[in-house]
Structure formats: structure tokens, C-alpha cells
Image: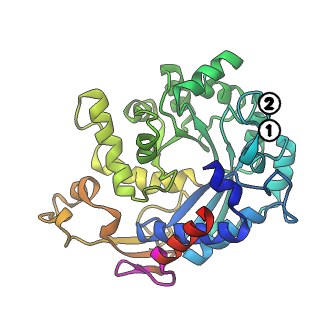
Amino acid sequence: MYAAAERIDPDTYLALARATYAEMALAGVTAVGEFHYLHHRPGGAPYDDPNAMGHVLIQAAAEAGIRITLIDACYLHGGIGEPPEGAQQRFSDGTAEAWVDRVTALPAGGAVRVGAAIHSIRAVDPDSARAVAGWAREGGRPLHAHVSEQPAENEACAASYGRTPTGVLADAGALDAHFTAIHATHLTDEDVRLLGDAGAACCVCPTTERDLADGIGGMRRLADAGASLSLGSDSHAVIDMFEEARAVELDERLASGERGRHRAADLLRAATAGGHACLGWPDAGRIEQGAHADLVTVGLDSVRLAGADHGTVLGSAIFAASAADVRHVLVDGHEVVRDGAHTKIDAPRELDDAIRAVMG
């Protein structure tokens, strides 16, 4: 990842993001929450426009036909108390105050929202986390953070601060209904209580968590505690919200030895309304008067959905469908995908070209 980050510039970033966002549209995704921390030139010097990389992400989403919440991440340290090195220098604004100055200049409105991220407690110290949380709270903006993705993160945080990452974020004033904990894989019972009492959201990314061998989070106990659930694709190695949704249930079955921990309707909600809400679009992800006209059709003619009928189609879709079954996608009433193809972008060709341009 760091080697690739060293080679990306605004032009290659635009091409890669545009193709990836088109792939997301093909999978039925109508709004992207981009956890954005590749801000500066190699070596850490700002571009002439300090938000050049953010602007190209906004442009890419517009060209791909989907909405975007640019979750601009504050990333100050390579590890707790360590300066950023190598590609990490591109991520850092140096101080939380400098991050605030830069991110405040980002445009928002229409199909664009701007949110904030405390990358993680290993990358943002508690005082800086408080500053980022304050900026988000003042504007009613979404605030995200990677939380307890790996046991080593918890151990380092406890050694430095005597608290879990969730505890440090609570002390920094970050936990409220606008906060989303990303991954939340290795939580204590007290962490779960803090997130639930705050009415926070938790975004899990099961295909990435599997890929990195990070573990299986307990989304059932988070939901029972009062937290809302959403889903992410994270690394984009797989962009398939059906797979992310069913993985919440199926992975927990493996860990717990119990079936039926999450209903299909709840998993669908996490993939739709829950995801939009934690990105600052509470009026999206459902079909009703006054909501965004985001409509996705799923074909029932593949072998994956053979035999589905009115009584079983929801469960069949969640537990058997794939992104390949998405047929048509409207975003705010505009047709973006027709008959399984993007209306403006040759996504497979552009994605292949963009990856080759970055990877050499």
C-alpha cells in the first residue's frame, strides 16, 4: 500500500478513483464514503492547492454518477509518539490545527458532504483527536475513526494512555450519534457500552477483516447495546455489499457456533440506510417520499437466485446474490447503470488502465 501511495499523483488518483467509483455504481452503491488521507506530495510538501487530492475525489464521484462524503482524515503520527515516515509523510498535516485549516476550505453541497476522521489513536494523539472531534461537532459533520482493528492497537493504546482506543475517543469527546467506529473488531464490554450509550454507528468491513486476518467483530452485542450498524468495502479488493452483509452473519456463526444472529432485513438496513446515515445522508437508503431517488434493481435470473419468490427473495438476495446480479441503478433519479453496464464509463477497461498506471 505504501509503495503504491508513493507513486500516486492527482492525475492517477482521479483515474483510479473514477474507475473504482464506477465499479461501486455497478455494484449498486449510490454514495461513497471516502476515508481520505493521501493529502500531500511525496515527502509531505503540500500541493499548490492543499486540497488537490480531495478535489479529484469529488470530481471522480461526479463523473461516476454517485454522491460522495469526503471523510478527510487527520493523520499525524506513524505510530503512538512516532513521526510519519516514507509514504506516511504524504498523510500528515503536521498538527491538528493545520488539518482544520486545510479541511475547512473543502467545498460541500449538492452531491458532496465533507466529514472528518481521526485516522486512529495510533496516528492521532488524544489532544489532536479532541480538536478534530470539535471541528466535526461544530458543523454537525460525520466523524469516523479506525477503532480496535487489531489486538496490537489495543495493547499500544493501553500502554501509552491506560485506556482502550474507544475510551480515549470517549475522553476526547468524539462519541456521539455522528460518530462511526470503523472495524471495531476487538472491543471490551466497556467499549461496547460506551458506543451503544452514545448511539454511535459501527462500520464493519468483513472481506477486508478476513483478508488481513484481523478477526471477527461482535456486531450482535453492539446492536444489542444500542449502536447502529453499517457496512464498508474498505480496501476495495472486493466491492460487493451482498457479500459484506451476509459475512456479518456468517462470520459470527463461525465465531459463536450460533445461527440467526442477524436477520436479513437488518443486514439490508446496514447496507443501505445505515450506511447512508453514517455518511451524513439520513434521507437516503430507503424508498419513500422525500428521500433521495436511489433505486437499484437486482435480477432474479441467475443461478444464484433461482427459485426465489415473493416470500423468500429478501433472504435469497442477502445470502446468495452478488454484485453481478445488479441490473439497473438510479442515483437521485439519474440512470447510472443500465442492464449491468455503466452508462458513461467502461469500468473494467478504465480500472485496469488505472491500476497499471499506478503499479507500473
Question: Is 328 rendered above or below residue 146?
Answer: below
Q: Residue furthest bottom?
A: 344
Residue 270 pos. (x, y %): 42, 50
Dividing the picture into quadrants, the one containing residue 6 is bottom right
Kind of residue at disc 2: Asp
Name the residue that disc number 1 marks: 131
Query: What residue appears at the point 20 percent right and 70 percent down from the top-left corner?
Result: 302
Residue 110 seen in the current view: no
Report crowding for label 2: few under 14, some 14 to 19, many 20 or more residues within 10 A (C-alpha).
few
Whole-percent x and y of residue 264?
28, 49
Examine the structure image and report whether residue 341 is included in the region drawn in magenta: yes
Q: Quadrant of the C terminus?
A: bottom right
Please state the extent of the stretch shown in magenta in the rendering: 337-348
- The answer to whether marks 2 and 1 mark residues whose Cβ atoms lie closer than 8 Å is yes
Q: Is residue 313 visible in the rendered structure shown here?
A: yes
Please give left or right for residue 193 compared with residue 313 in the image.
Answer: right
Q: Residue furthest front?
A: 360
The secondary structure type at the circle numbered 1 is helix
Residue position marked by numbered label 2 in the rendering: 127
Relative depth, front residue between 35 and 274: 35
Between the C-alphas of marks 2 and 1, the distance is: 7 Å
